[in-house]
Amino acid sequence: MHIRDSLKLVTAVTALLLPLSASASAEAVALPDDPAAKGLAIAEETDRRNQGFGDTKATMKMILENAYGETSERALRSMTLENPNPEEGDWTLNVFDKPRDVDGTALLTYAKILDPDDQWMYLPAVKRVKRISSVNKSGPFMGSEFAFEDFSSTEVGKYSYKWLRDELCPEPVAERTCHVTERYPLYEHSGYTRQVVWTDTTDYQGRKVEYYDRKGELLKTLTLTDYKLYESKFWRAHDLFMANVVTGKSTRLTWEEYSFGNGLTQNDFSTNALQRAR
Amino acid sequence: MNDWVVAYGKAIVKFRWLVVLASVAGVLYLASGGRFIEFSNDYRYFFTDQNPNLQAFERLERTYTSPDTLLWVLKPDEGKVTTPERLAIVKEITERAWQTPFSTRVDSLTNYQYTSAENDDLTVRDLVEDPASLSAAEADAIGAIALAEPVIANRLISEDETTTAIAATLKMPRDDQQATAEVMAHARALLADMRAAHPDIRFELTGSVALSNSFAEAAQRDLATLTPAMYLVLALTVFFLTRSIPGTIATILVVTLSAAAAMGLVMGWAGVKLTPPSSGAPTIILTIAVADSIHILVTMLIEMRRGLSKHDAIVESLRVNWGPVFLTSVTTAIGFASLNFSDAPPFRDLGNTAAVGALIAWFLSVTLLPALAAILPMKAKDTLVRQSEFMGRIAEVVIANRRVLLVGMIVVIAGLATLLPRFTFNDRFVTYFDERMEFRVASDWAADNLTGIYQISYSLGSGETGGVSNPEYVAKVEDFANWFRTQPEVVHVSTFSDVMKRINKSMHGDDESYYRVPDDREMAAQFLLLYEMSLPYGLDLNDQINVDKSATKLTLTLTDISTVEMQGLIDRADRWLKTNAPEHMYSYPAGQAVMFAFIGRNNFNAMTTGTAIALVLISACLMLALRNLRLGIVSLIPNLTPPIAAFGILALFTTEVGFWSTFVIATALGLIVDATVHFLSKYRRASIEQGKSPEDSVRYAFSTVGTALWVSTFVLIVGFAILALSPFKVNAMLGIMVALTVAVALIIDFLLLPALLITVDRRKKIAPPADVVASASPAE
């Protein structure tokens, strides 16, 4: 709890300072020297650059592959509403299209910072909304190598940080420089002990994330590519490739048909809306 | 030929220093490969890539999760495990088990994902979240809840709630000794901490990683204890026979270099990994190599006793022994090489190493040994002559009682042969290790108190993507699981149908009447999606559902049954599937237990061919060497009957054999042939070349090679009997049976063969004219 308090303080202080320093120049971000503060500042810069996106709609496809080379496909549509309250995360509504048996099933998520997310699922087969009450949802999302937390919104307050080094970015942007930051989940039921993030110094977008399991060993590697710019300021990666280094399984997650400014409101993200979502 | 050998012998004596230096240098170069030797601890190495059981096993592994496990089992001396304190211990082990290198999943009583319903909420949580906060009554109630869950009842908790297990699933790098050692160090440290902290509770560690580790430890133990023991026996035997310290030293040097060079060449330079069976190779090479040296040394000492100078004695010994020593080395190598027909690669390695060792031993026996003998001071002692006289007395007894011996021996061998059909294969891999191995003790105890180690898995296909939600499919899976539950051999069945039923019940407000397969496909799929969304890291369903949700894994845990009973169960299950299930559900069973269940049968089929080919080749060598078809045919009897008689003797004690038994004949054949070759070649020389009567020829054979034969047989018996000390029972039984076969072979060579030769040659008194065999044969 001491960590949380001090973190909130750091967040608050930096939040005050940031508009002064960072808004002046998007390219040259002034970062503190202390590794922890620098790591946090990098995360906040990433977060800041995504502020004000309002809402998005997109479709998602996942291709799962096991060590045997067998593949399987999942597809869903996703809506996100930016939550202006910094104490809470964004709201998302996912409607599943594939596999066929779960067509029309919808998942509503109110992301939290340090508490379990609030989640409801609408099951068309029984025409009921069920609340998912589980403290630990770090298991595979639809049998894929992604946990829900791996591709849903990343809130700054979910982690503490440590800047490690700057180095060349991974392919396909190997000519650029990346900040390499370690982040530690503050939520006690997280499935990970730490993550290492490569953040591009030019646009502050993530290029690669390494996930370490609870014994501190590398479990999965996420590569984010095919970034596109929307509204001339919001970057979105369209290709997320998660490789499980332990089991040899992998999942390619692709986003398509991104649209911004759809005029979505909180009414579109209620349990009632969930039942109509199809 | 003889002239050539004499010239060769003289050259060896003349250039003795050069020969010693060159041969030692060459052999040391081969042996230097030893620095590359690596141990293998992969039980999969016992199977070839073509083995259908291994293929099924690997398919299952790649489709679902790794099958490697570690199991910590605990049982308090008194009372149940369901107290707050003891549940806290389970939770602590669970947490620490997660820290095991390469672990991907840990299942225990405390982290079992317990589902419950409240209004429209689905709650999924650890069965025991905070043991300390539980009252005694609440903790006690956990037992009843757990036993009502078929997923964990009888697997993670015993019926009487006194024993519980924490199971870790690991994704081990394939055949990485370092990784296994690391995992075992962690697992054992946890075990040791628990034992120290809770003396009133018994903790044991088992699982497939512990099995792998036991293979490596058994191999290391064999090398560390058996090989030195073998040296001691060799040194003593050679010394008592020759009473010559230099002779003993020379012999020890030759056999050591043979074993080291063979190991260095095969295991080092060729990069073959060392396994428990192949770790028996040095002991076997020492044994077979010493026979060559003994023949050459003994002849040399006898000749010196007769008055020849040392150097002349060496040349004479080489002349007399050249053929037989070469022939016996080749037949030994053929016998071992036939192990290549085996379906178990470790035995191929053993065969190849021993075959190479036999050839290197031959080479050193005709180069290094005589050169060393020429350098070292040697004196002949009286004992040799006395032994020779003793052999003469045996010859007289045999000749006098030949009819009784002939009939008696044939009756005994035939009687023993009738016992052979009683044998059945049993390869429970836990019993490969004796009670000195921690793994054996732990596994037996775990099987007695909670759950067996033998598991069989089926990947049951639904025939369509997403078909695991098809009610018909799930119902059929449940039927199959229920059928298994009525089988006496089955302790536990882990099936997806139980998961589905459990979710269905929770989705209907925990209404007991919904504890059944959901009757609507979409509903089942959506329930499953919701349930999967609720599971934490590492406790997902990916270990029992494949990626496109078209198949699920059903896993049986078996009681401590024999492999014959296991085959019976597999056959019955096969019939059930074919009769009751749709074709796409048909599946081949997989698992370590299945692989080992068929290892006996597979190797028996493979080695029957291998042994037959070895027999034909060895007999051909013999006939060629003896240049005599009749003697060649006669030789089949002392070569073939010893394994029959030896297994007949074994049948008096037990009717169950492991897959090791399929290697006994091939291994023993090359060795027992040696005695026959020596005896027959001497008999032939007396009978055909010198025209002696059969009786006198027998006397001659006994007096010339009798001593060397019983001594080299004695060394073989002791050498293979030393393998009996191995904690790895496959090596121990192979050793015992080869020793027994060799012993029986000597008895037959001394008692039956002379009687047979006299009887056959008496009847066929027209001896072939001497000129037919005037050209010197290599077998002299």
Image: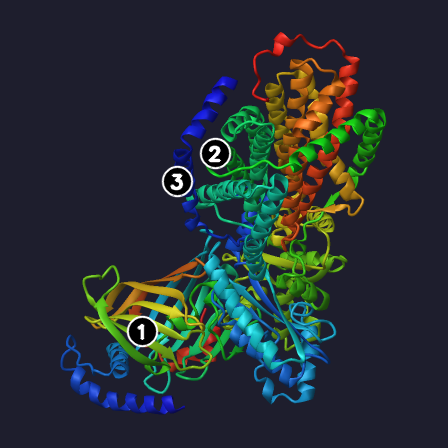
Name which residue lies at 41% across and 84% down. A114
Q: Chain of mark 1?
A: A
x then y, percent, for residue B237? 62, 44
The amino acid sitting under disc 1 is Asn
Residue B750 vertical placement versus A266 (above, below): above
Residue at x-position 57% and y-position 39%:
B290
Characterize the local packing of mark 1: few (<14), some (14-19) or many (20 or more) Cα atoms within 10 angstroms: few
Q: Amino acid at mark 3?
A: Ala
Question: Residue A262 shows which numbered tag?
Answer: 1
Q: Which residue is mark 2?
A: B374
Q: Relative to B637, is B42 on the left or the right?
A: left
- Pinpoint the chain carrying mark 3: B
Question: Comparing marks 2 and 3, which lies closer to the viewer?
Answer: 2
Pick the front one: B780 or B481: B780
Q: Earlier in the sequence, mark 2 or mark 3?
A: 3
Chain for numbered disc 2? B
B703 relative to A72, above or below: above
Cα distance between the residues tagged 1 and 3:
84 Å
Where on the picture, by quarter, is residue B300? Answer: top right
Q: Secondary structure at mark 2?
A: helix
Location of mark 3 (residue): B25
Residue A80 visible within the image: yes
Q: Quadrant of the C terminus of chain B?
A: top right
In this view, the mark in front (1 or 2): 2
Q: Regarding mark 3 in the picture, which secondary structure is present there?
A: helix
Residue at the image position 57 percent from the left and 79 percent from the top? B91
Q: Is residue B318 above or below residue B600?
A: above
The 10 Å Cα crowd at callout 3, few under 14, some 14 to 19, many 20 or more, is few
The Cα atoms of the two marked residues, 1 and 2, are separated by: 102 Å
